[in-house]
Structures are given as structure tokens and as C-alpha cells.
Amino acid sequence: MDNELHTKLEAVLKNINKVLVGRNDAAKMVLAAVVARGHVLLEDKPGVGKTMLAKALSRSIGCKFSRIQFNADILPGDITGVDIYTQEGEFKFVPGPIMSNLVLVDEINRGNPRAQSGLLEAMEEKQVTVGEESYQLNEPFCVIATQNPLDLAGTFPLAEGLLDRFMVTVSLGYPDISQELNMLDLWQGSNPLDEVEQVIDAKEVIAAQEAVTKIYVEQSVKEYMVKLVQKLRHDNQLRVGLSPRATLDVYQLSRAWALLHGRSYTLPDDVKAVASEALSHRLFLKDELAFGGVQAKYLVEEALTLITVPVVG
């Protein structure tokens, strides 16, 4: 385990916590997804700091940042870029905002399904196709999307295929009294986001991503992950079972979680720590259960209690 790398990742978390009070667990989950080469869906009510978290992260890691504001009339070309016909009689590709390292897709569920589909190829294959040409995206590449609750006006539910491409879904929630008082202290002067400085660069982010691939996962821990996914996949309360992509995401995310805690190996506790955020948004409950108030995260918590945890020996 590279101590210098771990120290720099800790510095990124400290940077975010300078802006968002009491959101250390959420910030750590987002950073784990980035170093695990995943994408993040921040799902919560307006005004709780979703966009602030993404901006603080982008300034901390010093990567190329772009923002796409989704709305009802946005088109896929507004995301990927377009071919334009020049005066010279040739087509020229004008890159869209997706051609960046860290892409903030703000209010993704205010975009129409056609626009949402413009993210699919980029998120899965790290490329976009415009006309007859495909263009590779920059490394590292991460989409951080924010989503408002579905009961708000003017929102479009994300399709199952798009939801499955997000490695984690993170909710920030409302601050308690002491956290909100600390927030007021932070904003007493200038915007605290203006004071966030870069602590690592794109090469170091890629180095962290490579370090994740070297985190050791013992066979019994792998079996623990697979049994958890299998248990949920065949739950008769679901309309659609978990995909193999979900298993891979739990695998990579638990390794990234171990890296952020300074270990070169993964524990069952790492799997437990990331399971809810990695799996809940992929559990599509039958309508009668969803209308009855059953939440997907409770299915994950129940499955964790039923699967035997591997122990030494």
C-alpha cells in the first residue's frame, strides 16, 4: 500500500469536508466510486449540497471538469457533440461537454429519455459515436449525476439500463442542528468552495485506479459477494434481477473502499459498507410493493443478515 497515495486521497476527503459539513461517509463513497472507475448518482432533495460535492471533488483532483444542465428539451447532441458542415465543404466534429474527465450531469431526471440515452455509450464504453466516427473519452472519466426525487414536477424516471450503469447511488440527507450551525460558520465570509485547492492531478487519480486493481480479495470474500448478489437476484419481490455488472461493481467498489482505509486487502466489512449504495438502485420492486412503501435498501440489509459472513479459518 502506497502511503503517499493514501495520504493524498485523505487530503481530497478533507477538502470536500471543508465545504460539506458532516458528509464524510457520502464523500468517501463518491471518491471510492471514482477510483474504482465507476459513476455516481447523487439522489436527494434540492439544496442539500449535491452539486457542491461534485464541484469540491473536481477542484480537489484537478481534472478537466464540465457541467451539463439537463432539461426537457435537451438532445443527445448537446451531450456528445455534433458534426458541422464547414465552408471548406468538410464535416468537422465539435466536441460536447461529455469530452471531459469529471462530468456533472445536473438534474439528470429532468432530461427526456432521448437525452438520457446519450449517456449510455459514454458511461459503459468510454467513447461516443457521432455520425460514422467514434471518439475515445479522456482518462480518468467519471459521470456524477444529480437526481431530484421522482415526485417533483417535470421529472422523467431513469431507465433500468441507465441506472445499472451507475456504480453507486448516494444520498446526503438534511444536516442536524450542529452541522447546520457549522455550515453557517463556513459561509460567514466568502464561498468556501473558492478556498478548495487541488491536491492531486489526473495522473495520480489514474495511479489510484491502478492501485485498486492490486487490492487482494480472498476467495471466501468473493463467494460472499456472489452469494449476496444471487440472493437478491432471485428475490420474488423484484421485477428484474441484479445483473452481473452489479457483482463486478461490488467487487471493484469494495476494493476501492479498502484502499481508502489504507489496506491492501478486502474484508467482508468492506462489502457490507458498500452493498446498499451499490445495489439498492438496481432493485426494481414489483409495483404493489413499491406503492406500499417498501424500500430497496431494506432488501439489501435483510440479505446481509441472511448470508453467512466468512471468517478466518
Image (tube, grey):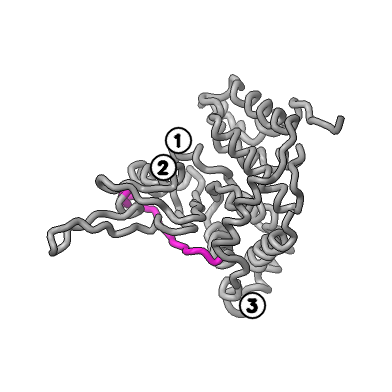
Q: Which residues are magenta?
A: 62-76
Residue beneath label 2, please?
A: 120
Q: Could you say which is closer to the camera, residue 15 or residue 151? A: 15
Residue beneath label 1, please?
A: 161
Residue at position x 47%, y 64% from top?
A: 64
Local crowd size for mark 3, using a 10 Å CA cut-off: few (<14), some (14–19), many (≥20): few
Between disc 1 and disc 3, the foreground one is 1
Tell me if residue 141 is in the magenta stretch: no
Q: Amino acid at mark 2?
A: Leu
* Distance Cα–Cα, label 2 vs label 1: 8 Å
Q: Amino acid at mark 1?
A: Gly
Local crowd size for mark 1, using a 10 Å CA cut-off: few (<14), some (14–19), many (≥20): few
Are the two marked residues, 3 and 2, in contact with CB atoms closer than 8 angstroms?
no
Q: Which mark is residue 22?
A: none
Q: Secondary structure at mark 2?
A: helix
Residue beneath label 3, please?
A: 188
- Res. 180 visible in picture: no
Are the two marked residues, 2 and 1, in contact with CB atoms closer than 8 angstroms?
yes
Left or right, 58 with respect to 97, comes to: right
Q: Could you say which is closer to the camera, residue 159 or residue 45? A: 159
Q: Quadrant of residue 96?
A: bottom left
Q: Position of residue 183 (x, y in %)?
A: 66, 68
Among the two numbered marks 3 and 2 on one chain, the one whose residue lies closer to the N terminus: 2
Q: Position of residue 74 (x, y in %)?
A: 32, 52
